[in-house]
Image (cartoon, rainbow, N blue to C red):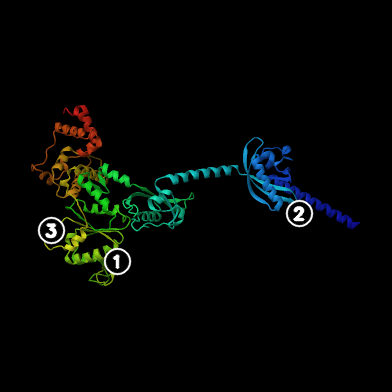
Amino acid sequence: MTENNHSGRSLGERLLELEAEKKSLETIIESIEDGFIETDLRGNITRFNRAFCHISGYGPEEAHGLSYRKYMDEPTALSVYRAFNKVYKTGVSNKAFDYEIIRKDGQRRNLEISIAPIQGEDGRVSGFRCVMRDVTKRKRAENELMGQRRRLEAIFRSVDDAIVTVDTDLNVVEANDAAAKICGIQAEKLPAAFTCGHDGQCSCACLDIVKETLARRRAMRDYQVACGRQSAPMQKVSLSCAPLEDPAGSFLGAVLVIRDITRLTDLERELEQRHQFHRIIGKSHQMQKIYRLVEDISDYEATVLIRGESGTGKELVARAIHDSGSRRFKPFVTVNCSALAEQLLESELFGHVKGAFTGAIRDHIGRFQAANGGTLLLDEIGEISPLIQLKLLRVLQEKEFERVGDSRSVRVDARVIACTHQDLKEKVRRGEFREDLYYRLNVLEIRIPPLRERPEDLPLLVEHFVRRFEKKFRMCIDGVSPEVMDVFMKYHWPGNVREVEHCIERAVILSRGGTIGIEHISGEILGSIRSGRPAKAMKKEDEIRRIAQILEQTDWNKAKSARLLGISRKTLYQKIRKYQIAPEKSAQV
């Protein structure tokens, strides 16, 4: 009897434990945010939690016995039936099944449901146990994101500019349809390594700018280059490249945009008179021809000979050739051939090894080697000795040289541009310059006219230098007075642009702000005017007449008139008000 009592107590305790576990499980089921239901084989609900009522909109008294067909449309109900039937037949749970329900209030909600079979001791399926989650917000966000991506993809495909994205290892991740047309990158063959120059004639400028962006992690915009592909040898493109980052700021790579500007460039050449090209100032017919010539030859590897008087800007033209071509991201190295003796110039050009001569305490890399891959400018080429002429000829012909004191040849790939103010052809005739070197240098020739041959460029140069030194010396300069501009236009400028620069620098300093007057101009310039005497101040009537003539000539374009008068627009407006100059009155003055 004692044993029976003990067994009874043990059974009772066990029942209490089971009851406690049941309540605990029910508490857990009721506390979760996901909906929970159990159904019979017909899909009628036999058990549910509060979260299901919240999701479906049906109250507890309505949820019991509720069929799944009650809260979904017929196509969805068929899909759900198939999912439940599969679980019934296989006995395997179906996880993360998506479908749409219709709440009691008519709202549609997206659910994600997991279905598990309820099996008896004999292994037969007697019903289903389901856990469902409301994923409506997530689905909407996914749909919006998908729609946005489709719109972006449509834009990506439809734009005429080539768009190419690369990772940090220079692998192309994406490319639009235009990339195939402009630069031959096929979207269906991605991802692939970024290659440029696949047809043997491309300038490879795209690859250079992508590498620069990846190295600097900074955007580079509107670099105009000649593409030079075999299939499109005259193609001109504008390159822009920017770094790519994810929302967390991690560096992912770069996006390259390539715009075909061939037609635009051709139209600009025909329709637009450029007043500035790179750092060169000038709008004259002669300078327009130089601008076009620089663009045409910039991507060719032939040597260039630039001729012009001292101070005409030969180095600026050489720099423009370099910056316009495919070598723009490579070194631009300059050496003044007239500033060094023969032995020093040889060492400077070709380098030397340690002990080659007295004072050679270490190896020295020459300018040719420093310019490898880029451009070497040989300034005042007419001053080099016969020995240097011979060595230079070999470099140009064979692309190799020996350093001073070394017998080993060094290969080099540098484009050579030579400058001179001398008549090399006359030096050849006199036997002072090698004829074969002259023709090797003079493959492409550019002659820069002296300033006296292009006086229309003088007002632009004056304005340019006034603004430069105004900024440098932190002054406010209104411009130059009309009488000063008259003196400038009469002067022959033997020092060319360099002399203009020095003249304006001096005048800005002496003027200390305001307008540059005749008293700020050097006596040397004033004394060289045809009369031999300093120019007198212009009379009021003459100044009014001159301003009115320029305004009529430019159709009252204030900016253009100010440039021609050599004054700022602010000063011009002041004079127009002061003298009460008007379109109808200007013809009467």
| Mark nearer the N terminus (2 vs 1) | 2
Nearest the camera: 271 or 479?
271
The kind of secondary structure element at disc 2 is: loop
Q: What distance separates the C-alpha of mark 2 from that of mark 3? A: 111 Å
Q: Quadrant of the N terminus?
A: bottom right
The kind of secondary structure element at disc 1 is: strand
Q: In the rendered image, is residue 219 in sight?
A: no
Q: Which residue is mark 1?
A: 411
Query: Does 119 sit left or right of 105 as displayed?
Result: right
Other-residue count near label 2 (Cα within 10 Å), few / some / many at <14 / 14–19 / ≥20 = few
| Residue 340 point in image, percent of width and height | 19, 63
Nearest the camera: 466 or 444?
444
Q: Which residue is mark 2?
A: 123
Q: Give the residue type at disc 1.
A: Arg
Name the residue at 29% across, 66% down.
411
Residue 319 to residue 268: above or below: below
Other-residue count near label 1 (Cα within 10 Å), few / some / many at <14 / 14–19 / ≥20 = some
Q: Which residue is mark 3?
A: 426
Q: Quadrant of the C terminus?
A: top left
